[in-house]
Image (cartoon, rainbow, N blue to C red):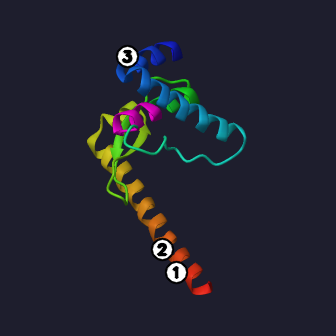
């Protein structure tokens, strides 16, 4: 299953994209294995575009679950750039369920933004 996913990934992304996705997934897995919290993000820059970000998350889904049937859906982010979530196939096929996931993630993102603003305010007041 992993071999088939990697072959498809190489075909879809080409050599440079394949290398970028593999390196990002390898680094994320290493961080998780060492007990570090890992930010699920690839390398900075335009070269790691949304299509490669989706491939990265799909590969992590296969590596972490052993399943190749998971789906990637677009979700809102505070910065307005596309965000992604890995979901069960049944959720991806159900428009109402997708909207519920998006709403839940958007609420969590809004809370994180508010917390960051509060922490920044407290930090600046103390400094």
Instruction: Determine whether 44 is above or below 93 in the image.
Output: below
Give x and y (percent) for residue 52: 39, 33
Crowd rating for badge 2 (residues with CA inside 10 Å; few <14, some 14–19, many 20+) = few
Q: Whole-percent x and y of residue 38?
A: 60, 46
Mark nearer the viewer, 3 or 2: 3
Look at the picture and state if 123 lies above or below 94.
below
Residue at 36%, 39% (x, y): give it: 49
Residue that numbered label 3 is attached to: 11
CA gap between label 3 and label 2 equals 43 Å
Around disc 3, counting alpha carbons within 10 Å, would you say few (fewer than 14), some (14 to 19), or many (20 or more)? few
- Farthest residue, direction left: 95
Q: Is residue 50 magenta?
A: yes
Q: Secondary structure at mark 3?
A: helix
Horizontal placement of 103 versus 21: left or right?
left
Q: Secondary structure at mark 2?
A: helix
Which comes before the other along the chain, label 1 or label 3?
3
The span shown in magenta is 48-57
Residue at the extreme right of the image, as rendered: 34
| Residue that numbered label 2 is attached to | 117
Please tell me whether residue 67 is drawn above or below residue 38 in the rendered image. above
């Amino acid at each position: 299953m992993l071999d088939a996913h990697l072959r498809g990934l190489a075909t879809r992304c080409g050599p440079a994209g394949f290398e970028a996705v593999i390196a990002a997934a390898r680094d994320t897995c290493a961080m998780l294995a060492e007990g570090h919290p890992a930010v699920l993000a690839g390398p900075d820059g335009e070269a790691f575009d949304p299509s490669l970000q989706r491939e990265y998350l799909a590969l992590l889904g296969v590596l972490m679950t052993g399943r190749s049937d998971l789906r990637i859906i677009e979700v809102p982010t505070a910065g307005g750039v596309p965000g992604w979530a890995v979901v069960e196939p049944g959720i991806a096929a159900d428009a109402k369920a997708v909207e519920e996931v998006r709403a839940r993630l958007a609420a969590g993102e809004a809370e994180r933004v508010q917390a960051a603003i509060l922490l920044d305010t407290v930090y600046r007041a103390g400094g």
